[in-house]
């Protein structure tokens, strides 16, 4: 349930952007990018946490590198957007691609190697990633229209 509840701020900021309203004086596009960067960093941390519990250092090294890479990409997207609203579109594209890459990395590094996930976790991650990327695309469309 928490995973799906995490979609609510994404939806809230999309609706705010659609109606051209600010929430607590925050630009909804910048708020969306900020929230997205935090969630991407968090999901990268999930990979890190999962790998800390394994004793197979050969297979955990790529996962640990990827977990840090996603945190850095999230930071980069946030920094890009902080240079001005004219770069929000680039941040949205970077984050969209990063979510897809994160799902692929999770699938290749974790889902197939570890059997201790709940059976529903990979399916949930596919659905959530699809929804998040879709909301990024909607936000991108709103940004340019």
Image (cartoon, helix red, strand yellow):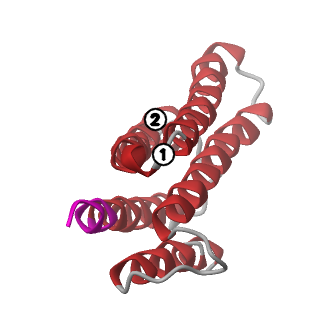
35 to the left or right of 136:
right
Picture coordinates of residue 140 (x, y %)? Answer: 29, 59
Query: On residue 84, which mark appears?
Result: 1
Is the residue 63 above or below the residue 23 in the image? above
Query: Residue 29 or 62: which is nearer the viewer?
Result: 29
Residue 144 covered by magenta stretch: yes
Query: Residue 144 or 118: which is nearer the viewer?
Result: 144
| SS at circle 2 | helix
Of the numbered discs 2 and 1, the one sitting upstream in the chain is 1
Can you identify the residue that label 2 sits on?
Answer: 105
The secondary structure that dominates the magenta segment is helix
| SS at circle 1 | loop
Q: Residue at x 53, y 33 (%)?
A: 73
Picture coordinates of residue 126 (x, y %)? Answer: 39, 60
Picture coordinates of residue 81 (x, y %)? Answer: 50, 45
Picture coordinates of residue 44 (x, y %)? Answer: 62, 41
Please give the range of residues in magenta.
138-145
Q: Residues within 10 Å of mark 1 (few under 14, many from 20)?
A: few
Name the image quarter holding the N terminus. Answer: bottom right
Q: Residues within 10 Å of mark 2 (few under 14, many from 20)?
A: some
Q: Residue at x 59, y 79 (%)?
A: 5
16 to the left or right of 25:
left
Q: Residue at x 51, y 32 (%)?
A: 109
């Amino acid at each position: 349930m928490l995973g799906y509840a995490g979609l609510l701020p994404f939806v809230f900021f999309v609706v705010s952007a659609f109606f051209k309203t600010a929430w607590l004086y925050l630009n909804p596009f910048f708020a969306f990018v900020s929230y997205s960067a935090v969630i991407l960093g968090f999901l990268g941390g999930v990979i890190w946490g999962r790998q800390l519990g394994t004793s197979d250092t050969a297979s955990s090294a790529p996962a640990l590198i990827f977990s840090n890479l996603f945190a850095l990409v999230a930071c980069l997207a946030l920094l890009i957007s902080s240079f001005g609203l004219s770069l929000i579109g680039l941040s949205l594209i970077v984050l969209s691609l990063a979510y897809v890459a994160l799902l692929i990395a999770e699938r290749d590094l974790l889902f197939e190697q570890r059997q201790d996930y709940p059976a529903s976790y990979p399916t949930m991650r596919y659905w959530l990633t699809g929804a998040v990327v879709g909301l990024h695309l909607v936000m991108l469309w709103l940004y340019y229209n």
